[in-house]
Amino acid sequence: MASALPSLLLFLTLSVLTTTISAHNITAILSAFPEYSQYNTLLSQTKLADEINSRQTITVLVLNNGALSTLTAKHPLSVIKNALSLLVLLDYFDPTKLHQIPKGTTLSTTLYQTTGNAPGNLGFVNITDTQGGKVGFGSAAPGSKLDSSYTKSVKQIPFNVSVLEISAPIIAPSILTAPAPSASDVNITGLLEKAGAKTFVSLIVSSGVLKTYQSALDKGLTIFAPSDEAFKAPGLPDLNKLTNAEVVSLLEYHASPAYIPVGSLKTSKDPISTLATSGVGKYDISTTTAGDSVTLHSGLTSSRVAETVLDATPVAIFTVDSVLLPTELFGKAPSPAPAGEPVASPSPTPVLAPSPNKAPVEAPSPSAASPPAPAGEAPGGAPADAPSDDSRNSTADKDNAVHVKASVMLTVLVMVSATLMSSIILS
C-alpha cells in the first residue's frame, strides 16, 4: 500500500494541473461546425482569434453563415472586426448562468471596450433573461433594443471558454456607420508624435524609412516605435556612429510587414520577421508574455510593448520602452554615446562603463490597455433594471474562485506528496 501511495499522489497532482492550466483554440473549436465557417474565417482574418485564445475566461457569441451575411455583404473588414469584437464577452456565460442572472439582467464587457474605440458604454452588451425562458442580447447604449437572442449552446470548457449561438448581430449605435479609414490614409508621423515618439519620427523622416513604411500600409504593417525616453537610456549605442545603411536597417527592424495586433503578439510562438529581414541577416524579433504584458526580444535587448497607438486592420502601431538592437548590427560591443560629464573616481583604477550589451531593466508588467470596467462601476446609461454591483459581479467571483481553489489544492497536494514520500523513504 505504501509503495502505491506516491503514484496515487502524483496522479492527483497531475489531475489538478490539468484543470488549472488550460488552453483553448477558438478556430479549432469552430472548425467542427460547418455552419460557422464564415465566422471562423473572419476570426482569423481580423486576428480576433489570437485575442480570444490569449484570454483565460471568455464567451464567444457566434452567428451562423446565414445570420453573418448581413454584416459581410455590406461592410469592410475593419468595420466587421469591430462588430465581431462586440460579440466576445470578457466573462464566462453558459446556458445555466444565462438563466440565473441576478434580477434578470446584467451588462458584460466585450473586446470592443478594450480597443479604446468605444465611447461611453458602447463596448458593453446588455444580457436580459426575458419572459418565456428566452435570453436577449443588445447594446448597452441608452434606448437600444434587444435585437438578438440566445439560440443554442455550441461548446463549453467550464469556466474558461463558452461558445453560444445567437440569432443576429448585436449592433451598437454608429458601429456600422462609422467611416472605415483607408490604410493609406494613416498619418504615421502624426500618431507617433502624439504618442511621445518624436525622436523616432525624426529618424524615419530623415532616413527615408517613412516612405518604406507607407508603401507597406495596404498589405499590412506593424510598427514598434521607441519612446523619446528610450533614446535617452544609459548604455544606448551612439547612433551617430552608424552608417546611413545601418540606420535604415535599425529603423526597418522596428516594423513588420504584417498586421500583428496585441492579441497576436501574446500568442506568437515563431520569430517575427521585420522589414529589415533579408537573406543576409535574419533581423527577427521574438516575444514573451507575462499576463497582459508583452515583451519583445532582439537577442541583445528587450523592450516592453507600452501602448497601442493604433489598431485598425491592417495596421497596428505600438510604442515600446526601449530601442531594439539587432544582433546583426550590434553583435559586437557597440560604442556608448558620449557622456555629458566625466565621472571622477577616488581610485586610480579607471571606472569601467557598464556594458552596452546589457539589456535595459524591464518595467513592471502593466495591466492591459483599455481594461474592462472596474468591478463595482457600472457604465453610464445602464438600463434602469440593471442589477446592483454586488449581484452583477457575484457570478464572476464564483468563476474566479474555482481557479484560486484549484491552485491552492495543487500547492497542498505537492506539499503532502513531498512529506509522505520522504516519510516512506526514511521508514
Image (cartoon, rainbow, N blue to C red):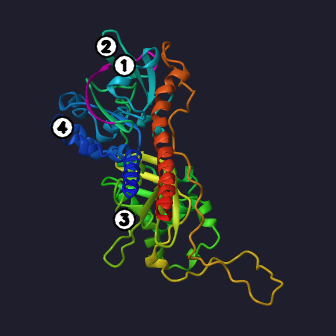
Q: Earlier in the sequence, mark 3 or mark 1?
A: 1
| Above or below 339: residue 321 | above
Mark 1: which secondary structure?
A: loop
Answer whether residue 263 is magenta in the image: no
Q: Nearer the viewer, mark 4 or mark 3?
A: 4
Nearer the observer: mark 3 or 2; the answer is: 2
Residue at 45 percent across and 76 percent down: it is 327
How far is disc 3 from disc 1 in space, using C-alphas? 45 Å
Pointer 4: what residue?
33
Q: Earlier in the sequence, mark 4 or mark 1?
A: 4
Q: Name the front one of labels 4 and 1.
A: 1
Front residue (pair 137, 410): 410
Of labels 4 and 3, earlier in sequence is 4
- Which mark, residue 271? 3
Identify the residue at horizontal 33%, vertical 41% (top origin). Answer: 78
Q: Which mark is residue 133?
A: 2
* Marks 2 and 1, the one that precedes in the sequence: 1
Q: Is residue 153 magenta?
A: yes
Residue depth check, mark 4 versus mark 2: number of the one nearer the observer: 2
Q: Which residue is mark 1?
A: 99
Residue 136's image quarter?
Answer: top left
Q: Are marks 2 and 1 in contact (CB under 8 Å)?
A: yes
Q: Which secondary structure, mark 2?
A: loop
Amino acid carrying mark 2 in the image: Gly
| Nearest to N terminus: mark 4 or mark 2 | 4
Boundaries of the magenta span: 141-157
